[in-house]
Amino acid sequence: MNKPDQPVLELRGVSKQYAGGVEAVRDVSLTLHAGKLLALTGTSGCGKTSLLKLINRLEEPSGGSVVYEGLDVRQSDAFRLRRQIGWVMQGDGLFPHFTVRQNIGVVPRLLEWDAATIELRVRELMQLVQLDVDAFAERYPHELSGGQRQRVGVARALAGKPDLVLMDEAFSALDPLTRDDLQRDFKRLQTELGFSAVLVTHDMAEALILADEIAVMRDGEIVQSGSPAELMANPVDDYVSGLLDTPRRQMRAIAELGG
């Protein structure tokens, strides 16, 4: 595990251009330190998911470099790299023909852990994400609620003991109560286990609640980055201010209800 003052992840002038000259990501530079959560946010099509995929080489950059734990990711085998970085996607992405136990144990099996160690890790993670082992270990994804499936997805992402977890709209498909519960549990897990995380979200309220730092994207570029308090106090332009309008209105409406 990295020390708190050490960067886990550095994006250095990263760009991504697709066929036809479409620039999805333009000259992005960011640093993520150990134990912190960075939220990438912005309107649809702003480049945040493309940027996330460049980190674990689901996409390859057209320019610049992605440095993970001091090493340019292009120097690592892509499959090995992905086993070292957790991934939680929208809609959980569980293997439907695997039980909960088998889904959580996927990465440890790929890492060639022995069966006893895998079983201990599965049990540990099920307890951490608040799923009773006896009740849920042998169930299949279709036998679970949306919140339960997403808890399995989080457990699977953490199974290989990664220093970094990537999340693409990980909580967006859940109902508000389940979403809030899982968000709080994820922050608890991050505090307990000490991993870093990058969260892609279109929901600025979610970014403000969960993140240590927020990077706002527009047309593939970072237009402002900083702590939630910094963005709320000093939005750099009307675009950032507009993204903050919804949580501001919600807070005012709730305050007014209290008299």
Image: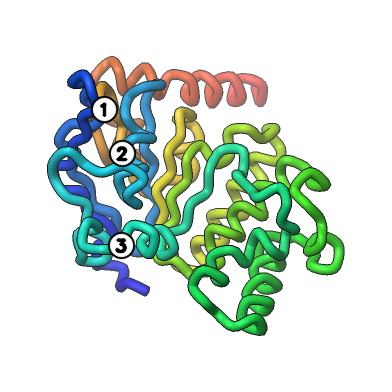
Q: Can residue 227 be seen in this view?
A: no
Judging from the image, what secondary structure is the residue with disc 1 in? strand
Residue located beneath label 1 in the image: 24
**Mark 3 crowdedness (10 Å alpha carbons): few <14, some 14-19, many ≥20:** few
The residue depicted at 44 percent of the width and 63 percent of the height is 83
- Could you say which disc has been placed on residue 68 in the image? none
Residues at circles 1 and 2 in contact by the CB criterion of under 8 Å: yes
Q: Is residue 54 visible?
A: yes
Image quadrant assignment for residue 28:
top left
- The Cα–Cα distance between marks 3 and 2, rounded to whole angstroms, is 19 Å
Q: Earlier in the sequence, mark 1 or mark 3?
A: 1
The residue depicted at 60 percent of the width and 50 percent of the height is 184
Q: Report x, y in % for residue 243.
A: 39, 21
Amino acid of disc 2: Leu
**Mark 2 crowdedness (10 Å alpha carbons): few <14, some 14-19, many ≥20:** many
Tag nearer the camera, 3 or 2 = 3
Residue located beneath label 2 in the image: 51
Q: How many labels does the image show?
A: 3
Judging from the image, what secondary structure is the residue with disc 2 in? helix
Amino acid of disc 3: Asp
| The C terminus - image quarter | top right
Please identify the residue farthest to the right as the structure is shown.
135
- The Cα–Cα distance between marks 1 and 3, rounded to whole angstroms, is 24 Å
Residue located beneath label 3 in the image: 77
Q: Report x, y in % for residue 187.
A: 53, 55
